[in-house]
Image (cartoon, grey):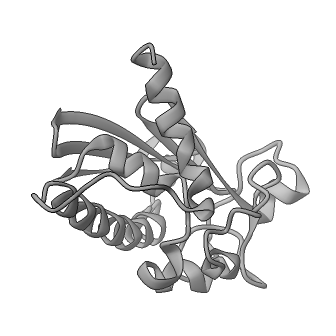
Amino acid sequence: MIGRTITYEVAANWKVLEENYNECYHCGPVHPELCDLVPSFRAGGASDLNWDDGVAHREGAYTFTSSGTTSRMPFAGLSDAELVNHKGELVYPNLFLSLSCDHVAAFVLWPKGPAHTTIVCNFLFHPSEVAKPDFDPSDAADFWDVVNLQDWAICERVQRGMMSKFFTQGLFAPMETPSLDIREWWKKQMGK
């Protein structure tokens, strides 16, 4: 059940946003709060992260909040790893899913032009948690808002650089391999 929604207007192409979501070599310098929660994100590129089993939080942390904890109950039926690890998934063409034990951050991207995307971020919680009189999603939503605004700012800078008259398409470094998925998917959609 939706516990909170935040809508963002981002001055960047949706494909830039997806490339950003699908890699983490920017995480160390851009996301200090996120890297405090998930120390392995500091590694350059983090291409060796095990997304199938989930990525471990720091010791004592188990969800995407600034403290790494919450009073909300976890979703039923999760494995031991899913109770303490974070999972993320890019679902083409325009959905990001970030899965914690107690909530899901679901981002839907709506391209509005070549350099403008509306992002609707819904924070999903178990209905029994939302029904509680003291339900407050702020610990998750506020943490995500910090991380999101950091991401959107860097994506807007990338977009400005790409729009420069001095920009030319370059080669991708090996550390950028995880973000190749969006380009490969897009080429198939365009029949290339």
Frontmost residue, 64 versus 115: 115
The image quadrant that residue 153 belongs to is bottom left
Query: Residue sitting at 46 percent across and 84 percent down?
Result: 29
Identified at 49% across, 49% down, the residue is 130
Nearer to the camera, 33 or 157 = 157
Numbered disc total:
0
> Percent position (x, y) of residue 172?
50, 56
Q: Looking at the image, can residue 122 be seen? A: no
Q: Is residue 82 above or below residue 59?
A: above
- The quarter of the picture where the C terminus appears is top left
Q: Would you identify the image quadrant in which residue 80 lies? A: bottom right
Residue at position x 61%, y 53% in the image = 177
Q: Position of residue 98 (x, y in %)?
A: 56, 51
Left or right, 77 with respect to 39, comes to right
User: In the image, is residue 139 above or below residue 127?
Assistant: below
Spot occupied by residue 33 in the image (x, y as percentages of width and height) = 49, 83
Location of residue 132 with respect to 94 vertically, above or below: below
Q: Residue at x 55, y 62 (%)?
A: 173
